Amino acid sequence: MHVVIVGGGKVGSHLAKVLAGQGTDVALIEENEQRCELLAEEMKAAKVRLICGDGDEPYVLDEADVRGANAVVAVTGHDEDNLVVTLLGKREYGVPMTIARINNPANAWLFTETFGVDRSVSNTSMIVDMLDSCIERGECAL
């Protein structure tokens, strides 16, 4: 299995290491040069291919072999970048599975199949749902 992850922050770098540890072929794309330098040895040790560049750019996605990917995961800190990555992955490259991180819950309505997103993840929404569920069951004191 080949997975392309765009965004080398905490979420992306940890995800890359976990997947690589499970035997997945992982390409991690990070735009920030300083962050790339910090990740270089860590990703090399984890057997993750690190690509320094803008994941919104097709030539960078080509370098990551997105055309051969089973999944593209967009976990940058910017919703607009995550949408561009998934849209390119799905529409231009025909990637079977696209997953995008939602940073601002107000943008959740955009993260749909129309914009190339198969699955989306919002930490804020998940925590709110957990709290609502806890309150409904009477398991948390407020």
Image (cartoon, rainbow, N blue to C red):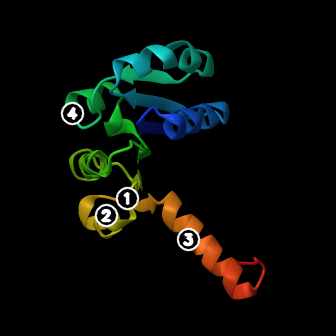
In the depicted structure, whether residue 142 falls above or below residue 116: below
**Residue 101 in picture, x, y percent from top left:** 42, 53
Helix, strand or loop status at disc 1: loop
The label number, if any, that marks residue 128 in the structure image: 3
For the question of whether residue 112 can be seen, the reply is: no
| Front position in the image: 64 or 7 | 7
The span from disc 4 to disc 3 (Cα, nearest Å) is 34 Å
Quadrant of residue 67 within the rendered picture: top left
The span from disc 1 to disc 2 (Cα, nearest Å) is 6 Å
On the image, numbered disc 4 is attached to which residue? Answer: 57
The span from disc 1 to disc 3 (Cα, nearest Å) is 13 Å
Quadrant showing the C terminus: bottom right
**Residue 63 in picture, x, y percent from top left:** 31, 24
Answer whether labels 1 and 2 touch (C-beta < 8 Å).
yes
Q: Is residue 119 left or right of residue 52?
A: right
On the image, numbered disc 2 is attached to which residue? Answer: 107
Q: Amino acid at mark 1?
A: Asn
Q: Is residue 101 left or right of residue 114?
A: right
Q: Amino acid at mark 4?
A: Glu
Quadrant of residue 81 within the rendered picture: top left
| Front position in the image: 9 or 66 | 9
On the image, numbered disc 1 is attached to which residue? Answer: 104
Is disc 4 surrounded by few (<14), some (14 to 19) or many (20+) residues within 10 Å?
Answer: few
Residue occupying image coordinates x 31% and y 64% = 107
In the depicted structure, whether residue 25 falls above or below residue 69: above
Helix, strand or loop status at disc 2: helix
Give the mark nearer the N terminus: 4 vs 3: 4
For the question of whether residue 79 can be seen, the reply is: yes
Give the mark nearer the N terminus: 3 vs 2: 2
Q: Amino acid at mark 2?
A: Asn
Which residue reaches farthest front?
Answer: 142
Q: Mark 4 or mark 3: which is in front?
A: 3
